[in-house]
Image: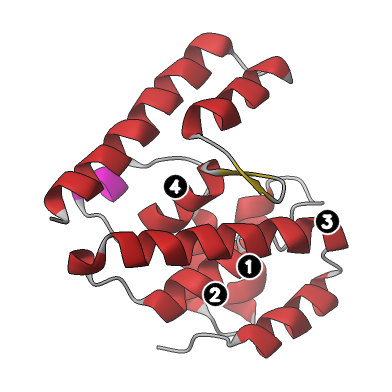
Amino acid sequence: MKIPDDQTCERLWNEAGTPLHVRKHCEAVMRRACALCEELPSWRFDEDLVAAGALLHDIMRAYPRHAEAGADFLDDKGYPEVARVVRDHMRLRDDMEAHIDERAVVYLADKMVMEDMPCSIAARYLAAALRGADPAAMEKETARAEALYDKMRRNGI
């Protein structure tokens, strides 16, 4: 498995033209994702994959369908495992609930950071609702994300 190190992630950001504020967000998500790995050691996540996936999850945020654009970019660069994490960071897929892996860690960490500041999952989805997202849908996503986090904590003991 080929996973980019921190220097390679920075080079990829430069190549993609990732803005500084997005890089700061990605770094905050990476710190939260790594903290989740420490909090849940019995899950035995690949922490290098988690860190790279978190650092690169919004590499193409300035583009439409940024998760897919970022995943395609990383696939083209030879990082298919990281691309898979990036592709799935926006939405909690059913298979991520059934088979918790590095994608779930990055997904949750992203929902626990607003720009470059830690926040609750509920606060992150409330902010989306205030920006115009459907409030009922955001309430449902909050419940799903919180349930996943609870499941990870319960099963990780």
- Would you say the residues marked 2 and 4 are in contact, meaning their CB atoms lie under 8 Å apart? no
Q: In this view, does 39 lie to the left or right of 156?
A: right
Question: Where does residue 67 sit, x and y in percent of width and height?
Answer: 61, 53
Do the residues under discs 3 and 2 have CB atoms within 8 angstroms?
no
Distance, label 1 to label 2, CA atoms, is 6 Å
Q: Which mark is residue 141?
A: none
Which residue corresponds to mark 2?
52
| Kind of residue at badge 3 | His
Q: Which of marks 3 and 2 is in front?
A: 3
Circle 3 is placed at which residue position?
21
Q: Which of marks 2 and 4 is nearer the N terminus?
A: 2
Question: Distance of mark 1 from mark 3, alpha carbons?
Answer: 13 Å
Q: Disc 1 marks which residue?
A: 56
Query: In the orientation shown, which residue stands out farthest toward the top?
Result: 136
In the displayed structure, 27 sits above or below 106; it is below
Q: Which amino acid does label 2 sit on?
A: Ala
Q: Which mark is residue 108?
A: 4
Q: In this view, does 28 lie above or below 114?
A: below
Q: Position of residue 4 (x, y in %)?
A: 57, 86
Residues at discs 1 and 2 in contact (Cβ within 8 Å): yes
Classify 78 as above or below 83: below
In space, the residues marked 2 and 4 are separated at their CA atoms by 15 Å
Q: Which one is nearer the viewer's eye here, 87 or 10?
A: 10
Near-viewer residue (52 or 16): 52
Task: Give the residues drawn in magenta, as a range.
Answer: 94-98
